[in-house]
Image: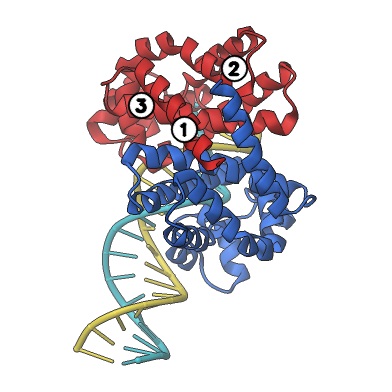
Chain colours: A red, B blue, C yellow, D cyan
Amino acid sequence: MALFEERGYERTTAAAIAARVGVTERTFFRHFPDKREVLFDGEAVLRTALTAAIAEAPGALGPLATLFWSFRSIRPLLENNRPYSEPRHALIAGTPALYERELAKTAALTDALADALRLRGVADLRAALAARTGMAAFVHAVIAWLEDPEPGLGERLERTFAETVALVAEAGH
Amino acid sequence: MALFEERGYERTTAAAIAARVGVTERTFFRHFPDKREVLFDGEAVLRTALTAAIAEAPGALGPLATLFWSFRSIRPLLENNRPYSEPRHALIAGTPALYERELAKTAALTDALADALRLRGVADLRAALAARTGMAAFVHAVIAWLEDPEPGLGERLERTFAETVALVAEAGH
DNA sequence: GTCTATAGGACGATAGAC
DNA sequence: GTCTATCGTCCTATAGAC
Protein backbone atom coordinates (compact mmCIF):
# COMPACT_ATOMS: atom_id res chain seq x y z
CA MET A 1 0.00 0.00 0.00
CA ALA A 2 2.85 2.40 0.83
CA LEU A 3 4.44 1.90 -2.59
CA PHE A 4 1.11 2.05 -4.41
CA GLU A 5 0.12 5.30 -2.72
CA GLU A 6 3.52 6.75 -3.54
CA ARG A 7 3.70 6.00 -7.27
CA GLY A 8 0.37 4.47 -8.23
CA TYR A 9 -0.37 0.80 -8.84
CA GLU A 10 0.66 0.58 -12.47
CA ARG A 11 3.92 2.44 -12.00
CA THR A 12 4.90 0.10 -9.18
CA THR A 13 6.57 -3.02 -10.53
CA ALA A 14 6.36 -6.42 -8.91
CA ALA A 15 10.14 -6.27 -8.60
CA ALA A 16 9.86 -3.06 -6.58
CA ILE A 17 7.38 -4.65 -4.16
CA ALA A 18 9.63 -7.66 -3.78
CA ALA A 19 12.68 -5.48 -3.16
CA ARG A 20 10.77 -3.52 -0.51
CA VAL A 21 10.33 -6.65 1.58
CA GLY A 22 13.76 -8.06 0.75
CA VAL A 23 12.90 -10.92 -1.57
CA THR A 24 13.36 -11.45 -5.29
CA GLU A 25 10.70 -10.88 -7.94
CA ARG A 26 10.32 -14.64 -8.41
CA THR A 27 9.64 -15.14 -4.74
CA PHE A 28 6.91 -12.53 -4.94
CA PHE A 29 5.21 -14.55 -7.66
CA ARG A 30 5.51 -17.67 -5.55
CA HIS A 31 3.42 -16.04 -2.85
CA PHE A 32 0.92 -14.37 -5.17
CA PRO A 33 -0.29 -15.88 -8.44
CA ASP A 34 -0.37 -12.41 -9.95
CA LYS A 35 0.39 -8.84 -9.00
CA ARG A 36 -3.22 -7.87 -8.27
CA GLU A 37 -3.67 -10.60 -5.71
CA VAL A 38 -1.34 -8.86 -3.30
CA LEU A 39 -4.27 -6.62 -2.37
CA PHE A 40 -6.95 -9.29 -2.03
CA ASP A 41 -5.79 -11.59 0.73
CA GLY A 42 -8.58 -10.46 3.05
CA GLU A 43 -11.42 -11.81 0.95
CA ALA A 44 -11.06 -15.29 2.44
CA VAL A 45 -11.65 -13.93 5.94
CA LEU A 46 -14.84 -12.23 4.85
CA ARG A 47 -16.07 -15.33 3.06
CA THR A 48 -15.40 -17.56 6.04
CA ALA A 49 -17.15 -15.18 8.43
CA LEU A 50 -20.19 -14.80 6.20
CA THR A 51 -20.70 -18.46 5.36
CA ALA A 52 -20.33 -19.33 9.06
CA ALA A 53 -22.92 -16.69 9.94
CA ILE A 54 -25.33 -18.07 7.35
CA ALA A 55 -24.99 -21.52 8.86
CA GLU A 56 -25.69 -20.13 12.34
CA ALA A 57 -28.59 -17.85 11.44
CA PRO A 58 -31.99 -18.64 13.02
CA GLY A 59 -33.63 -21.45 11.09
CA ALA A 60 -36.92 -19.62 10.70
CA LEU A 61 -35.43 -16.93 8.48
CA GLY A 62 -35.99 -17.03 4.72
CA PRO A 63 -33.04 -16.84 2.29
CA LEU A 64 -32.78 -13.06 2.03
CA ALA A 65 -33.51 -12.47 5.71
CA THR A 66 -30.72 -14.94 6.47
CA LEU A 67 -28.32 -12.88 4.37
CA PHE A 68 -29.36 -9.60 5.97
CA TRP A 69 -28.90 -11.18 9.39
CA SER A 70 -25.43 -12.38 8.39
CA PHE A 71 -24.38 -9.02 6.99
CA ARG A 72 -25.40 -7.38 10.25
CA SER A 73 -23.45 -9.95 12.23
CA ILE A 74 -20.12 -9.24 10.57
CA ARG A 75 -20.35 -5.48 11.11
CA PRO A 76 -17.60 -5.41 13.77
CA LEU A 77 -15.21 -7.15 11.41
CA LEU A 78 -15.74 -4.48 8.78
CA GLU A 79 -15.61 -1.61 11.22
CA ASN A 80 -12.34 -2.78 12.75
CA ASN A 81 -10.91 -3.12 9.29
CA ARG A 82 -11.86 0.32 8.08
CA PRO A 83 -8.43 1.96 8.57
CA TYR A 84 -7.07 -0.51 6.04
CA SER A 85 -10.07 -0.95 3.76
CA GLU A 86 -10.84 2.70 3.19
CA PRO A 87 -7.56 3.70 1.45
CA ARG A 88 -7.58 0.31 -0.23
CA HIS A 89 -11.02 1.04 -1.66
CA ALA A 90 -9.85 4.41 -2.98
CA LEU A 91 -6.89 2.78 -4.71
CA ILE A 92 -9.00 0.02 -6.24
CA ALA A 93 -11.68 2.43 -7.43
CA GLY A 94 -9.05 4.41 -9.32
CA THR A 95 -7.29 1.45 -10.93
CA PRO A 96 -9.23 -0.52 -13.59
CA ALA A 97 -7.13 -3.68 -13.28
CA LEU A 98 -7.74 -3.77 -9.53
CA TYR A 99 -11.40 -2.95 -9.89
CA GLU A 100 -11.84 -5.96 -12.16
CA ARG A 101 -10.23 -8.22 -9.61
CA GLU A 102 -12.43 -6.78 -6.87
CA LEU A 103 -15.49 -7.61 -8.93
CA ALA A 104 -14.23 -11.16 -9.41
CA LYS A 105 -13.77 -11.54 -5.66
CA THR A 106 -17.26 -10.22 -5.05
CA ALA A 107 -18.65 -12.68 -7.59
CA ALA A 108 -16.82 -15.55 -5.89
CA LEU A 109 -18.23 -14.42 -2.57
CA THR A 110 -21.72 -14.31 -4.06
CA ASP A 111 -21.32 -17.92 -5.21
CA ALA A 112 -20.16 -18.91 -1.74
CA LEU A 113 -23.21 -17.28 -0.16
CA ALA A 114 -25.49 -19.13 -2.56
CA ASP A 115 -23.82 -22.41 -1.59
CA ALA A 116 -24.24 -21.60 2.09
CA LEU A 117 -27.95 -21.00 1.48
CA ARG A 118 -28.21 -24.33 -0.34
CA LEU A 119 -26.83 -26.03 2.76
CA ARG A 120 -29.85 -24.60 4.56
CA GLY A 121 -32.12 -26.29 2.04
CA VAL A 122 -32.78 -23.37 -0.30
CA ALA A 123 -33.39 -24.49 -3.88
CA ASP A 124 -30.63 -24.02 -6.43
CA LEU A 125 -31.73 -21.10 -8.57
CA ARG A 126 -33.52 -19.47 -5.67
CA ALA A 127 -30.29 -19.51 -3.67
CA ALA A 128 -28.36 -17.96 -6.54
CA LEU A 129 -30.92 -15.18 -6.99
CA ALA A 130 -31.11 -14.46 -3.27
CA ALA A 131 -27.31 -14.27 -3.07
CA ARG A 132 -27.16 -11.83 -5.98
CA THR A 133 -29.92 -9.67 -4.57
CA GLY A 134 -28.48 -9.66 -1.07
CA MET A 135 -24.97 -8.85 -2.30
CA ALA A 136 -26.35 -5.97 -4.34
CA ALA A 137 -27.61 -4.40 -1.12
CA PHE A 138 -24.54 -5.31 0.94
CA VAL A 139 -22.03 -3.95 -1.56
CA HIS A 140 -24.08 -0.79 -1.99
CA ALA A 141 -24.12 -0.16 1.75
CA VAL A 142 -20.44 -0.92 2.32
CA ILE A 143 -19.27 1.26 -0.56
CA ALA A 144 -21.44 4.15 0.56
CA TRP A 145 -19.97 3.79 4.05
CA LEU A 146 -16.38 3.54 2.79
CA GLU A 147 -16.81 6.70 0.76
CA ASP A 148 -18.53 8.59 3.57
CA PRO A 149 -18.24 7.37 7.19
CA GLU A 150 -21.42 9.18 8.28
CA PRO A 151 -23.83 7.68 9.06
CA GLY A 152 -22.16 4.54 10.43
CA LEU A 153 -22.16 1.14 8.78
CA GLY A 154 -25.03 -0.16 10.90
CA GLU A 155 -27.23 2.70 9.81
CA ARG A 156 -26.16 2.30 6.17
CA LEU A 157 -27.06 -1.38 6.23
CA GLU A 158 -30.49 -0.81 7.79
CA ARG A 159 -31.34 2.00 5.41
CA THR A 160 -30.25 -0.05 2.42
CA PHE A 161 -32.22 -3.12 3.48
CA ALA A 162 -35.30 -0.95 4.05
CA GLU A 163 -34.86 0.81 0.73
CA THR A 164 -34.48 -2.51 -1.07
CA VAL A 165 -37.75 -3.66 0.44
CA ALA A 166 -39.43 -0.41 -0.60
CA LEU A 167 -38.07 -0.48 -4.15
CA VAL A 168 -39.11 -4.05 -4.77
CA ALA A 169 -42.51 -3.70 -3.13
CA GLU A 170 -43.25 -0.78 -5.43
CA ALA A 171 -42.21 -2.79 -8.50
CA GLY A 172 -44.40 -5.71 -7.45
CA HIS A 173 -47.47 -3.43 -7.65
CA MET B 1 -14.18 -17.28 -31.68
CA ALA B 2 -13.00 -19.88 -34.18
CA LEU B 3 -9.44 -19.70 -32.90
CA PHE B 4 -10.50 -19.59 -29.27
CA GLU B 5 -12.69 -22.66 -29.64
CA GLU B 6 -9.88 -24.47 -31.40
CA ARG B 7 -7.03 -23.87 -28.95
CA GLY B 8 -8.55 -22.09 -25.97
CA TYR B 9 -8.28 -18.40 -25.15
CA GLU B 10 -4.99 -18.43 -23.31
CA ARG B 11 -3.23 -20.58 -25.88
CA THR B 12 -4.28 -18.23 -28.66
CA THR B 13 -1.83 -15.35 -29.01
CA ALA B 14 -2.75 -11.88 -30.14
CA ALA B 15 -0.33 -12.40 -33.02
CA ALA B 16 -2.29 -15.48 -34.10
CA ILE B 17 -5.56 -13.55 -34.13
CA ALA B 18 -3.95 -10.78 -36.13
CA ALA B 19 -2.47 -13.23 -38.62
CA ARG B 20 -5.88 -14.88 -39.07
CA VAL B 21 -7.34 -11.63 -40.35
CA GLY B 22 -4.22 -10.63 -42.29
CA VAL B 23 -2.86 -7.80 -40.17
CA THR B 24 0.11 -7.53 -37.85
CA GLU B 25 0.02 -7.91 -34.08
CA ARG B 26 0.49 -4.19 -33.61
CA THR B 27 -2.50 -3.42 -35.77
CA PHE B 28 -4.56 -5.73 -33.60
CA PHE B 29 -3.66 -3.63 -30.59
CA ARG B 30 -4.65 -0.49 -32.43
CA HIS B 31 -8.18 -1.83 -32.76
CA PHE B 32 -8.41 -3.29 -29.27
CA PRO B 33 -6.80 -1.80 -26.18
CA ASP B 34 -6.14 -5.31 -24.93
CA LYS B 35 -6.65 -8.90 -25.98
CA ARG B 36 -9.80 -9.48 -23.88
CA GLU B 37 -11.64 -6.59 -25.47
CA VAL B 38 -11.89 -8.44 -28.76
CA LEU B 39 -14.84 -10.35 -27.24
CA PHE B 40 -16.68 -7.42 -25.69
CA ASP B 41 -17.61 -5.14 -28.52
CA GLY B 42 -21.30 -5.88 -28.14
CA GLU B 43 -21.66 -4.35 -24.70
CA ALA B 44 -22.13 -0.85 -26.15
CA VAL B 45 -25.15 -2.01 -28.13
CA LEU B 46 -26.79 -3.43 -25.04
CA ARG B 47 -26.06 -0.29 -23.03
CA THR B 48 -27.48 1.98 -25.70
CA ALA B 49 -30.63 -0.10 -26.04
CA LEU B 50 -31.21 -0.26 -22.30
CA THR B 51 -30.60 3.39 -21.51
CA ALA B 52 -32.88 4.37 -24.40
CA ALA B 53 -35.57 2.05 -23.08
CA ILE B 54 -35.26 3.56 -19.60
CA ALA B 55 -35.76 7.03 -21.05
CA GLU B 56 -38.84 5.87 -22.94
CA ALA B 57 -40.47 3.86 -20.16
CA PRO B 58 -43.88 5.05 -18.89
CA GLY B 59 -43.38 7.95 -16.50
CA ALA B 60 -45.58 6.46 -13.79
CA LEU B 61 -43.23 3.54 -13.17
CA GLY B 62 -40.95 3.55 -10.14
CA PRO B 63 -37.19 2.91 -10.51
CA LEU B 64 -37.22 -0.87 -10.35
CA ALA B 65 -40.41 -1.22 -12.40
CA THR B 66 -38.73 0.97 -15.01
CA LEU B 67 -35.80 -1.41 -15.15
CA PHE B 68 -37.98 -4.50 -15.39
CA TRP B 69 -39.93 -2.83 -18.21
CA SER B 70 -36.66 -2.04 -20.01
CA PHE B 71 -35.28 -5.55 -19.63
CA ARG B 72 -38.47 -6.93 -21.13
CA SER B 73 -38.26 -4.49 -24.02
CA ILE B 74 -34.82 -5.64 -25.18
CA ARG B 75 -35.73 -9.30 -25.23
CA PRO B 76 -35.72 -9.55 -29.06
CA LEU B 77 -32.21 -8.15 -29.17
CA LEU B 78 -30.97 -10.87 -26.83
CA GLU B 79 -32.91 -13.63 -28.52
CA ASN B 80 -31.58 -12.73 -31.96
CA ASN B 81 -28.09 -12.67 -30.57
CA ARG B 82 -28.25 -16.06 -28.90
CA PRO B 83 -26.37 -18.03 -31.61
CA TYR B 84 -23.39 -15.82 -30.89
CA SER B 85 -23.81 -15.15 -27.17
CA GLU B 86 -24.29 -18.75 -26.08
CA PRO B 87 -20.89 -20.13 -27.14
CA ARG B 88 -19.38 -16.83 -26.08
CA HIS B 89 -20.83 -17.28 -22.61
CA ALA B 90 -19.42 -20.81 -22.37
CA LEU B 91 -15.96 -19.55 -23.34
CA ILE B 92 -16.08 -16.66 -20.86
CA ALA B 93 -17.35 -18.84 -18.03
CA GLY B 94 -14.37 -21.14 -18.50
CA THR B 95 -11.70 -18.43 -18.71
CA PRO B 96 -10.98 -16.42 -15.55
CA ALA B 97 -9.43 -13.47 -17.39
CA LEU B 98 -12.50 -13.17 -19.60
CA TYR B 99 -14.88 -13.64 -16.71
CA GLU B 100 -13.27 -10.71 -14.92
CA ARG B 101 -13.72 -8.51 -17.96
CA GLU B 102 -17.33 -9.59 -18.27
CA LEU B 103 -17.94 -8.56 -14.68
CA ALA B 104 -16.36 -5.18 -15.39
CA LYS B 105 -18.66 -4.67 -18.37
CA THR B 106 -21.67 -5.61 -16.27
CA ALA B 107 -20.58 -3.14 -13.60
CA ALA B 108 -20.21 -0.39 -16.21
CA LEU B 109 -23.67 -1.23 -17.50
CA THR B 110 -25.06 -1.04 -13.96
CA ASP B 111 -23.59 2.45 -13.60
CA ALA B 112 -25.14 3.48 -16.91
CA LEU B 113 -28.56 2.24 -15.78
CA ALA B 114 -28.25 4.22 -12.55
CA ASP B 115 -27.44 7.34 -14.56
CA ALA B 116 -30.43 6.75 -16.82
CA LEU B 117 -32.64 6.50 -13.74
CA ARG B 118 -31.19 9.75 -12.41
CA LEU B 119 -32.23 11.44 -15.64
CA ARG B 120 -35.77 10.41 -14.71
CA GLY B 121 -35.40 12.21 -11.39
CA VAL B 122 -34.49 9.29 -9.16
CA ALA B 123 -32.26 10.31 -6.25
CA ASP B 124 -28.58 9.44 -6.40
CA LEU B 125 -28.13 6.55 -3.99
CA ARG B 126 -31.61 5.24 -4.68
CA ALA B 127 -30.78 5.03 -8.39
CA ALA B 128 -27.55 3.18 -7.67
CA LEU B 129 -29.29 0.64 -5.42
CA ALA B 130 -32.14 0.11 -7.86
CA ALA B 131 -29.66 -0.46 -10.69
CA ARG B 132 -27.73 -3.02 -8.65
CA THR B 133 -30.89 -4.83 -7.59
CA GLY B 134 -32.37 -4.82 -11.08
CA MET B 135 -29.15 -6.04 -12.67
CA ALA B 136 -28.94 -8.86 -10.13
CA ALA B 137 -32.26 -10.15 -11.43
CA PHE B 138 -31.49 -9.48 -15.09
CA VAL B 139 -28.11 -11.19 -15.06
CA HIS B 140 -29.55 -14.14 -13.17
CA ALA B 141 -32.29 -14.61 -15.74
CA VAL B 142 -30.05 -14.20 -18.78
CA ILE B 143 -27.41 -16.61 -17.51
CA ALA B 144 -30.02 -19.22 -16.63
CA TRP B 145 -31.43 -18.85 -20.15
CA LEU B 146 -27.99 -19.03 -21.82
CA GLU B 147 -27.19 -22.22 -19.96
CA ASP B 148 -30.57 -23.78 -20.64
CA PRO B 149 -32.81 -22.45 -23.44
CA GLU B 150 -35.99 -23.88 -21.88
CA PRO B 151 -38.08 -22.10 -20.78
CA GLY B 152 -37.56 -19.10 -23.07
CA LEU B 153 -36.05 -15.79 -22.05
CA GLY B 154 -39.42 -14.11 -21.56
CA GLU B 155 -40.47 -16.77 -19.10
CA ARG B 156 -37.10 -16.65 -17.33
CA LEU B 157 -37.40 -12.90 -16.87
CA GLU B 158 -40.94 -13.03 -15.50
CA ARG B 159 -40.15 -15.84 -13.11
CA THR B 160 -37.06 -14.05 -11.87
CA PHE B 161 -38.88 -10.75 -11.35
CA ALA B 162 -41.64 -12.56 -9.47
CA GLU B 163 -39.18 -14.50 -7.35
CA THR B 164 -37.29 -11.32 -6.50
CA VAL B 165 -40.52 -9.77 -5.29
CA ALA B 166 -41.29 -12.87 -3.23
CA LEU B 167 -37.81 -13.10 -1.70
CA VAL B 168 -37.72 -9.47 -0.68
CA ALA B 169 -41.30 -9.40 0.59
CA GLU B 170 -40.49 -12.30 2.87
CA ALA B 171 -37.38 -10.56 4.20
CA GLY B 172 -39.34 -7.38 4.90
CA HIS B 173 -41.66 -9.36 7.22
C1' DG C 1 -3.00 19.16 -46.83
C1' DT C 2 -5.05 16.61 -43.30
C1' DC C 3 -6.91 12.51 -41.42
C1' DT C 4 -6.86 7.67 -40.75
C1' DA C 5 -4.93 2.98 -41.04
C1' DT C 6 -1.04 -0.16 -41.34
C1' DA C 7 3.56 -1.37 -40.47
C1' DG C 8 8.17 -1.87 -38.18
C1' DG C 9 11.54 -1.75 -34.50
C1' DA C 10 12.52 -1.51 -29.74
C1' DC C 11 11.34 -2.35 -25.15
C1' DG C 12 9.54 -2.87 -20.12
C1' DA C 13 6.66 -5.76 -17.26
C1' DT C 14 4.02 -9.77 -16.18
C1' DA C 15 4.01 -14.36 -15.44
C1' DG C 16 4.96 -19.28 -16.80
C1' DA C 17 8.32 -23.23 -17.67
C1' DC C 18 11.92 -25.51 -15.89
C1' DG D 1 17.19 -18.84 -9.74
C1' DT D 2 17.37 -18.72 -14.86
C1' DC D 3 15.22 -18.15 -19.06
C1' DT D 4 11.76 -16.72 -22.07
C1' DA D 5 7.00 -16.10 -24.25
C1' DT D 6 3.44 -12.80 -24.46
C1' DC D 7 1.18 -8.58 -23.61
C1' DG D 8 0.98 -3.99 -24.39
C1' DT D 9 3.37 0.86 -25.13
C1' DC D 10 6.28 4.30 -27.51
C1' DC D 11 8.11 6.10 -31.50
C1' DT D 12 8.52 6.85 -36.40
C1' DA D 13 7.48 5.96 -41.34
C1' DT D 14 4.37 5.06 -45.19
C1' DA D 15 0.08 4.61 -48.02
C1' DG D 16 -4.51 5.82 -49.25
C1' DA D 17 -9.04 8.72 -48.60
C1' DC D 18 -11.17 12.90 -48.66
- Give left or right: position of A151 versus B157: left
Which amino acid, mark 3? Answer: Ile
Query: Which residue is identified by label 3?
Result: A17
Question: Of residues A83 and B133, which is closer to you in this image?
Answer: B133
- Give left or right: position of D7 versus B3: left
- Give left or right: position of B30 versus A67: left
Q: Answer above or below: position of B107 versus A46.
A: below
Q: Position of residue B148 (x, y in %)?
A: 77, 48
Q: Residues within 10 Å of mark 3 (few under 14, many from 20)?
A: many
Secondary structure found at label 1 = helix
Which amino acid, mark 2? Answer: Thr
Q: Position of residue A20 (x, y in %)?
A: 32, 21
At x 46%, y 58%, the residue is B58
**Mark sitting earlier along the chain (3/1):** 3
In this rendering, do the residues under marks 1 and 2 share a single chain?
A: yes
For marks 2 and 3, give the one nearer the viewer.
2
Q: Are marks 2 and 3 in contact (CB under 8 Å)?
A: no
> Is residue A167 visible to the viewer in this orientation of the structure?
yes
Quarter placement of the N terminus of chain B? bottom right
Q: Position of residue A127 (x, y in %)?
A: 67, 28
In 3D space, how far apart are the residues under numbered discs 3 and 1 (Cα atoms)? 47 Å
Query: Which residue is identified by label 2?
Result: A66
For marks 1 and 2, give the one nearer the viewer.
1
Q: Position of residue B53 (x, y in %)?
A: 48, 60
Query: Which residue is identified by label 1?
Result: A166
Which label number is shown at residue A50? none
